[in-house]
Amino acid sequence: QVQLVESGGGSVQTGGSLTLSCAVSGYTSGIIYMGWFRQAPGKEREGVAGLLMSGGRYHVESVKGRFIISQDKARKTLSLEMNSLKSEDTATYYCAARTSQYDGSWSDLLGSADFDYWGQGTQVTVSS
């Protein structure tokens, strides 16, 4: 079992920055991929960024150049640094973990949201 707890959400003005954190505990050695997802009211959940625990990361086009996914192995934390925030970034953000190999593309993996473990989410609100 893996437990994920997000933190760091809040309210920020357009153009501002926030860094989300996801504390990872439990059977962490079994995790192969981690990802950040978000869901805005009335919209479907969408993948934002993914990270391969052995190396490699991916950001969807809408956040590329503004968001950075990273991990701190010593602290067992996944982070999402968000800069130049826009109103359309307003959503509940979730971190997720997957414990099996995936043979498709990053885009397909994040699009499928086929992850085994999920956190409870943290709210990010961007306003002008």
Image: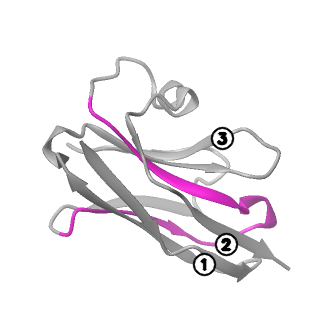
* Rendered view: 51 above or below 126: above
* Residue 99 percent coordinates (x, y): 27, 32
Span colored in magenta: 75-99
Q: Is residue 117 left or right of residue 19?
A: left
Q: Are marks 3 and 2 in contact (CB under 8 Å)?
A: no
Which residue type does callout 1 highlight? Ser
Image quarter where the N terminus lies is top left
- Which residue position holds label 2? 84
Mark 2: which secondary structure?
A: loop
Q: Residue at x 42, y 19 (%)?
A: 104
Between 112 and 53, the one nearer to me in the picture: 112
Label of residue 17 in the image: 1
Say which label, 3 or 2, has the lower sequence index. Answer: 3
* Rendered view: 18 above or below 107: below
Between 47 and 27, the one nearer to me in the picture: 27
Q: Are marks 1 and 2 in contact (CB under 8 Å)?
A: yes
Displayed quadrant of residue 112: top right
* Residue 77 percent coordinates (x, y): 29, 64
Give yes or no for residue 22 being in the magenta stretch.
no
Displayed quadrant of residue 12: bottom right
Say which label, 1 or 2, has the lower sequence index. Answer: 1
Between 107 and 33, the one nearer to me in the picture: 33
Q: CA distance from mark 1 to mark 2?
A: 6 Å
Label of residue 45 in the image: 3
